[in-house]
Amino acid sequence: MEFALYDRTFGYYARAAQRSGRAGDFFTSVDVGPLFGELLATQVAEMATILRATAEPATHAENNPLSARSAVPAFDLVEAGAGNGRLSADILRALRERQPELYPQVRLHLVEASAAARAAQQTTLDDVRDRLSSASGLLPESFEGVLVANELLDALPVHQVVMREDGLKETYVAAVRRTIEGPPSTPELESYFDRLGVTLEPGWRAEINLRAVEWIRDAAQRLTRGFIILIDYGHEARELYSASHAHGTLTTFSGHRSDVARGAAPWLEQPGEQDITAHVDFTSVRDAAEAAGLTTIAFLDQTYFVLGLVEQWTATALAQRSAALKTLVMPGGLGSTHKVMIFGKGVGRPRLKGCSFSARVT
């Protein structure tokens, strides 16, 4: 999976600056238009206000009120899995228009593994590229602000396992279009289910995303203070590892079609030419985040996150964006399949606009 998606020469993501949209293989919330970025800008701006309100005053400004008022800290906006930068560009343009006092404080960090996508970021950012502080394949060493990851975790390489009568087995690629089963490559795979209290029945397949757990731990360590917003499709562990997903969730996308029905292992076909993805285990992500010092603030459907953010919009503004809004909240589509998980560090447990409508997970 890592080779097929991320190899520098042959990888699916490495060879193109953009894979989603009508001309691509799948559709994301960013492809709806700038509305998703506008909505996230509303949430990011509120988070920036909370950070300012809870910041400790600088020592050198304690006896100088004028200095304390004029010292405006930088605000880091980090997007992981940024692609060519479309989402960040939409967020920044909305901040510049609606939060002009915040916009000059923003330091944008784009994190993207694909060199082709990174090469396109300056052009995509265009009139807001003055806010770009860094662009690389790694998260900043440390940052204070907001980290956004939209559909990142589902594309991290997973281990596929299957339960047999004699115990847990892992699926390995033996040759082109052929797999074999063998002992788990690491004891972490069996302990993963033990930690969750999950028991697979014989014949059940499942995916374990150790990379997602490692990623959130790393992000938590690098975040000095602020928020992390994860947007992805997946489930709590008790649902993901159950009879309803007994065949696993590993699948491919090509030409806006899920190719799971083409064969037992469609992801072996045409490596580097199609997307490969698996649903996220949000329980393990949350447990790892909290163990690393983060506070879980919310977990809800994208539908309710979006409705919370537009609650104060005027009827005219909503009417102008009605088609895009319907796409983002559509049940059975992006609205219910995509979940939003928000973490905080050093900010308490604030009531956020994105959670004001409802905190429901379907």
Image: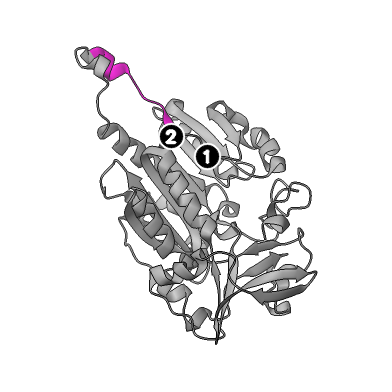
Amino acid at pointer 1: Leu
Which range is magenta? 66-76
Question: In the picture, residue 121 is in which quadrant?
Answer: top right
Label 1 crowd bin: few (<14), some (14–19), many (20+), radius 10 Å? many
**Please, what secondary structure does the residue beneath circle 1 have?**
loop
Residue at image point 27% right, 19% down: 69
Compared to residue 140, the image places residue 208 above or below, namely below
Say if the magenta span includes residue 69: yes
Say if the magenta span includes residue 216: no
User: In this image, 211 relative to 70: left or right?
Assistant: right
Question: In the picture, residue 285 is in which quadrant?
Answer: bottom left
Label 2 crowd bin: few (<14), some (14–19), many (20+), radius 10 Å? many
The residue beneath circle 1 is 139
Amino acid at pointer 2: Phe
Of 231 and 305, which appears nearest the observer?
231
Q: How many marks do you count on the picture?
A: 2
Task: Tell me the quarter of the image containing the C terminus.
Answer: bottom left
